[in-house]
Image (cartoon, helix red, strand yellow):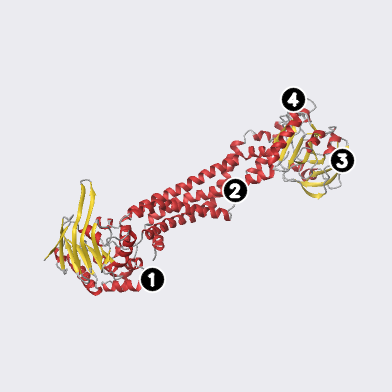
Amino acid sequence: MLTISNLKKSFSSGAGDVTAVKDVSFEARSGEMVAIIGPSGSGKSTLLSLLGLLDAPDSGSLSLDGKELASLSESERTHFRAKQVGFVFQQFNLIPNLTARENVMLSLEFANYPKAQRAARAEEMLTMVGLTGDKANRRPAKLSGGEQQRVAIARAFANQPPLILADEPTGSLDRATGQRIVALLRATATTQDATVLVVTHDESVAKQADRRLEIEDGVLREIA
Amino acid sequence: MNAITRGVKNTFRNSIRTVGIVAILTVAIALSISMLVARDAVNKKIESVRASTGNTISVSPAGFFGFSGGGTPLTTTQISDISSIRHVTSVTSTLTQRLTSSDTSLTAPTPSGSLGGQFSGGFGGSGGFPGGSSGTFTPPVRVVGTTTPGQALVGGANGGGTETLVSGSSFSGTSTADVAIVGKTLASTNSLKVGSTFTAWNTKITVIGIYNAQSTFANSDVLMPLATVQKLSGNANDVDSATVYVDSVDNVSAVQAKIKAQLGSAADVTNAQQQAEQQLAPLNSVKTISTYTLLGTVVGAGIILLLSMLMIVRERRREIGVLKALGAKSSSVMRQFIAEATTFTLLGSFFGFLIGIVLANPITSTLVTNASSSSSSGFSRDGGFPGGGFPGGSLPGGGSSGGFHFGARGFGHAITSVQTSIGFSTLLVALLIALLVAAVGSSVAVANIARVRPAEVLRSE
């Protein structure tokens, strides 16, 4: 269970302080897929940074399965990300000189997954997202956009984190591929009982989520 | 695949860049290795020369300067007084004379030749060697009266080495017998063997040994007991060169001062160390050049790698952010980039080392030769006694060619023969240099990695 309460984050800019996230509060259950939608500059990415512990909030509370995370130190946040959070990015962000399998194994390495089981686990995850045969040995440049995003999903879920954060996961894909990727995200979340938060501006993606939240000017509200 | 492996793998991510960086590092490290070897070789030579000349003082009559000087010979009494100075362990003396065809039955082995002919007009004056202004010049035979047979020609008049007996025996330093050991070239020319005799100053001299002193010129001499030469040449008690041995390098200056005080203006007293330092100036110059070049190339290699790694880190900023977002510790990412910088350095070191070893000897030789030739122009004149040539005129005061300047000539030849070698210490220093380059090259890049915030990966989406 992810619980957010009165989360706030401001940035300094030339025009003074800008509050990107204003007193955001919500909850998301395990196995639930929640879509966060909003226009550019509404605070989506900042909120995702806070939820993924890439950034620290100015105030508020953030807990996962009862553990308070907002006050963690930098090294504790790193440890938490490695073990408890999976990321799926719009641009896939695979390491270009590593194969699909090695990319998946990367998150297992950071999570201190048993060394001897990493290759098998990566293979299992790639098969789960539909990448079989020699594609596991291909570098990202030799895979299509959809296939790269599947590798990214396999990487995010590989060490079975309870929280998956997806930032515009279909933004670089065609509509049909995007639909399949979202379906895959949802199915994997259900299989692994993970909470999935998807930031998107694509209404069709948001409609596949269990719940939809809208953020505008840093203020979050639930929409029907 | 851990951070180190990823770092090594990343080295080959962009082949063109890899070749470029490694090529530049190779050139820099090859130059570093060459300079390191050159510096090491020159340093060893300097130490060796200093060690061999460090505790001696040369004493010669004031104004005595080979053919260019004159002066009044020192006396055995003066030399004897030097022996009693504190810290003096021994004193060796020589008196060098020349036997013209009217003084000896010997024939000089070396013909006058065109070089000798240049001097056949000789110096002005009377009582000179045969030939005189007529230009028909007969080279004399040089006789060295010495108290130290076996060391009389070392770095001496003929630039020879230690006389090594090839047959027969030597004489004692205090001998007064009419005996001689002759150079093998002179022996061959005159068909001399051990037991043969020849005449000098109308006296029958018996050959008791034949030596080899490593040069044709030195092997054309006759070595006889000092007392015998003094007696036969009519120069009783005369000495034209003495070498004073001091118990410690630390006492050389004090003893030199005492000798100067004792002999006053009658003698030129020079410290072998000072002479050595003069002759070692070119080598010291090479040492300085190689040291600065070594530092320059190491710093240059470090800067090249540093800029390359900065460029790489800048280019992979997003990737660093992704790794951190996925849970990689900063230290892990840093290790990856340090491994990459180290791999670049080791590749450059490997090729640079091979090329450096090949280039070390020619570079060292060129540096030493150039430095020596540029600093020895006034010196080669004194190294005279060219070929078989010899001034047809007189030598003032019957002056000889012995002493410092010929010695220096031999010295000069010796210092240019610097041998390079790659020892364990050189390898160790080269490895340390490589690690230093890698450390410098990756330091700023690593510091930049620490500053990359994982949140940037989302903001730049």
Secondary structure state at the residue bearing disc 4? loop
How many numbered badges does the structure rendering display? 4
Distance (Cα) linking label 2 and label 1:
51 Å
Relative depth, front residue between B157 and B120: B157
Q: Amino acid at mark 1?
A: Lys
Numbered disc in front, either 2 or 1 = 1
Mark 2 or mark 3: whose residue is earlier in sequence: 2
In which chain is the residue bearing label 4? B
**Left or right: B423 in relation to A192:** right
In which chain is the residue bearing label 3? B
Q: Residue at x 47, y 52 (%)?
A: B436
Using the image, tell me which numbered label, if any, was put on residue B124: 4
Q: Residue B12, position in %: x, y?
A: 39, 59
Using the image, tell me which numbered label, if any, was put on residue B176: 3
In which chain is the residue bearing label 1? A
The image quarter in which residue B343 lies = bottom left
**Left or right: B437 in relation to B61:** left
Mark 2 or mark 4: whose residue is earlier in sequence: 2
Residue that mark 2 sits on? B41
Q: Amino acid at mark 4?
A: Gly
Distance (Cα) linking label 4 and label 1:
97 Å
Are the residues flagged by discs 2 and 3 from a single subunit? yes
Circle 4 Cα neighbour tier, 10 Å, few/some/many (<14 / 14–19 / ≥20): some
Relative depth, front residue between B285 and B450: B450
Circle 3 Cα neighbour tier, 10 Å, few/some/many (<14 / 14–19 / ≥20): some
Distance (Cα) linking label 2 and label 4:
46 Å
